[in-house]
Amino acid sequence: MMLLGLEYLTVFRGDRKVVDAVSLAVAAGEVVGLVGPNGAGKTTLMRGALGLLPHEGRSTLAALPTEARSRHAAWLPQAREIAWPVSVETLVALGRIPHGARWFADSHEDVRAVSAALAQMDLDGFRHRIATRLSGGEQARVLLARALAQETPLLLADEPIAGLDPAHQIATMEVFHALAGQGHAVMASLHDLGIAARFCTRLVMLDAGRLVADGPPGDVLSPARLRDVFGITAWRSETPEGLVIQPIARAEAAP
Ligand SMILES: Nc1ncnc2c1ncn2[C@@H]1O[C@H](COP(=O)(O)OP(=O)(O)OP(=O)(O)O)[C@@H](O)[C@H]1O
């Protein structure tokens, strides 16, 4: 089942075309990594797809009425700001608002969803802590838990693992896989190409607003694209654990 369809999506920032005619579809069961250098248009693509920025072309998500959209897709923005000194539990419960919850999510479904999201992000011991008094990575996990608590078919996440320690990065990618296994889909922008190669079912590569590759991680992260798009060389190997990619040097600095 298709959960997101983009047809020639073009997104402007001011009068600049920052995403240029991108077409793709995301189906249930996929963990799609959005990769590309700084400024390639990853955030803009996702915000355009959500209908948060003016766009041309079509996004099936942006075309939904507001309420249906908030029940279909959860959005984790890049900025990790927590404005209010509320408990972790309260903050995560705010994710239930699209399902009709008020300030305190207290239906049986809401309580279950909040508990599940806290457990998924390894936050059981943080339930009653004040969210603004957590470390940067802990706050990032709380905001991810709030997005997960929405239990939407689709999750769009902007650099969801930035600032997380290695174990929590891997755990988060495993949560995405588990969601995909339950028929959801995740699209996440990622800068860690090793993680992207290892944990995504598919990669979409952007360069200067254009989609330049879309497919299995091993195909998308070819030596030529790593050189031409990212300007790097990388060590790559098919291992019993799957594809391993480790950036080594800037391409121009390579011997
Ligand atoms: N508000 C804005 N006004 C004008 N240009 C903008 C604005 N926001 C972003 N841009 C430009 O749009 C382009 C794409 O930005 P975007 O944030 O989508 O990139 P990104 O791929 O998510 O980058 P990063 O990896 O650095 O997060 C960049 O060139 C950026 O400078």
Image (tube, grey):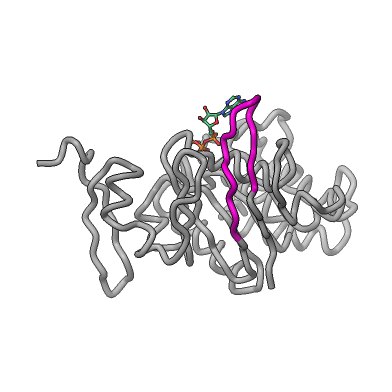
Q: How many marks?
A: 0
Task: Using the rendered view, name the quadrant where residue 103 is placed.
Answer: top right
Task: Please say whether residue 215 is one of the residues in the magenta stretch.
Answer: no
Q: Residue drawn at (39%, 48%), measured in percent from left and top?
A: 192
**Residue placed most toward the observer, 153 or 108:** 153
Left or right position of 224 against 216: left
Which residue reaches farthest top? Answer: 14
Q: Find residue 82 and report its horizontal and vertical position in percent.
A: 66, 32
Q: Is residue 148 visible?
A: yes
Q: Taking 181 as reference, is 165 above or below it?
A: above
Quadrant that contains the N terminus: bottom right
Displayed quadrant of residue 197: bottom left
The one of 146 and 28 positioned closer to us in this rendering: 28
Q: Quadrant of ligand 1?
A: top right
Q: Is residue 143 visible?
A: no
The segment highlighted magenta reads 9-24
Quarter-of-image position of residue 218 = bottom left
The picture places residue 11, in percent across and down from the top left corner, at: 64, 38
Q: Is residue 18 magenta?
A: yes
